Amino acid sequence: MTRILHVLDHSLPLHSGYCFRTRAIMKSQLAGGLDVAGVTGVRQDQHGFEASGPLEEVEGLSFFRTLADVHGPSPIREWREISVFAERIAEVVEQWQPDVLHAHSPVLNGLAALRVAQRTGLPLLYEIRAFWEDAAVGNGTGREGSPRYWLTRQLENHVIQSADAIAVICEGLKNDLIRRGTASEKITISPNGVDLSLFGQLPEKDAGLSAELGLEGKTVLGFIGSFYDYEGIDDLITAMPTLLAKCPEARLLLVGGGPMEKQLKAQVADSAAASAISFVGRVPHEEVDRYYGLMDIMVYPRKSMRLTDLVTPLKPLEAMAQGRLVAASDVGGHRELIADGQTGLLFPAGNPEKTAKKLADLINSRAQWDQIIENGRKFVAADRNWSSNILRYNPVYQKLIASRTLVQAA
């Protein structure tokens, strides 16, 4: 049986889009007859989860842990992380004997896995979910064009050039790599997908929760996620007074939290639409469906920048799978997922006035909702379903294993 070792920043039982994609990949691969395990780096603990031992099983998946504390100023700390993680990966390789190393971004994981691949001769598939330097700009911890940005990009290029194969989650990332000089045939697209066994049912409306939040008889626009600047929630809040003038029954429900929470609450307090906007805060993962069930339209108003133009998000796909109407800004990552007027709605990024108009037109076109929702669900089932998406890895694995066998036989 072919064994794949996934090299990861963090994993379950933490809850994040990163963890959910990993879970979907590993579970689908197990169901497809592969033997898979994950190994996580020192940042698993930094994400708020302390491992109970060197090997843990979560939801039937096996994860080897790196039990080490790494300290020091940046970038010394990062180099220490790479060394510690590489040693742990090497230990797992010796113990578990995988056939392929499948490292997932960020680049620190790629660098650690590359050391082990070069030492052992194992083939390396490096998967990029987002460029780390662009993610840092998006979450406010980095600046485009800074020395750190440039260095991170050079390290990423080194891993890309040295790995045996590259996987990316969308066309935007592939095209960027090709512009950097990476051969198209080296790159496989494994798009974000949805496990329909988890996200394929329409959540029932919780009438008690709706009454508690004052949403009975209202058209509810919803956002569930992290409050980063690039998500553009401030633009959506700015659009609300204009939207209310056209659709007085509209309400905005914001579920989550993050760096922009304080600023967004202050913005709402000063808004003429304050009474129509509610913050719920963070809710336990098992409670999320209760809030999904209240929302008529899931809105994703991302701002236009490299991160959002290159990377496709997961949440709109999950919303479509759950039978929710999806409206999103027309950044590149959304245009790969949503056909305007067919599987959802696209509105101009960074333009609250036009956003309000497009949302009002959608609210006033209820006769079209059922068809758009059905088109969205069919798109996810046909093109973004993990049970079929996962097959894209298999030819890559087989080619890498065959190439290693030829090298060993020579």
Image (tube, rainbow, N blue to C red):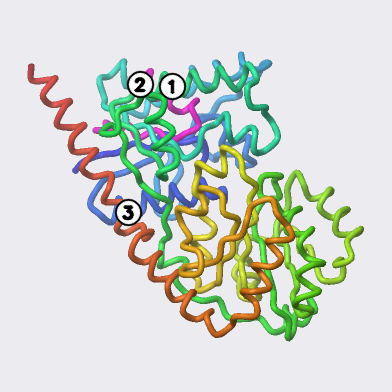
- x 57%, y 48%: residue: 14
- Tell me what residue is drawn at x 51 percent, y 22 percent: 153
Give the residues in magenta. 96-116
Q: Amino acid at mark 3?
A: Asn
Q: Which labelled disc corresponds to residue 389? A: 3
Q: Residue at x 84, y 55 (%)?
A: 265
Q: Are marks 1 and 2 in contact (CB under 8 Å)?
A: yes
Circles 1 and 3, Cβ within 8 Å, touching? The answer is no
Please indicate whether residue 102 sits to the left or right of residue 108 in the image. left
**Which corner quadrant of the image does residue 143 belong to?**
top right
- Does the magenta-highlighted stretch encompass residue 101? yes
Where's residue 285, x and y in %? 61, 60
Residue 215 appears anywhere in the view: yes
* Position of residue 24 measured from the top left corner of the image (x, y, whole percent): 40, 53
The residue under label 1 is 157
The local secondary structure at tag 3 comes to: helix
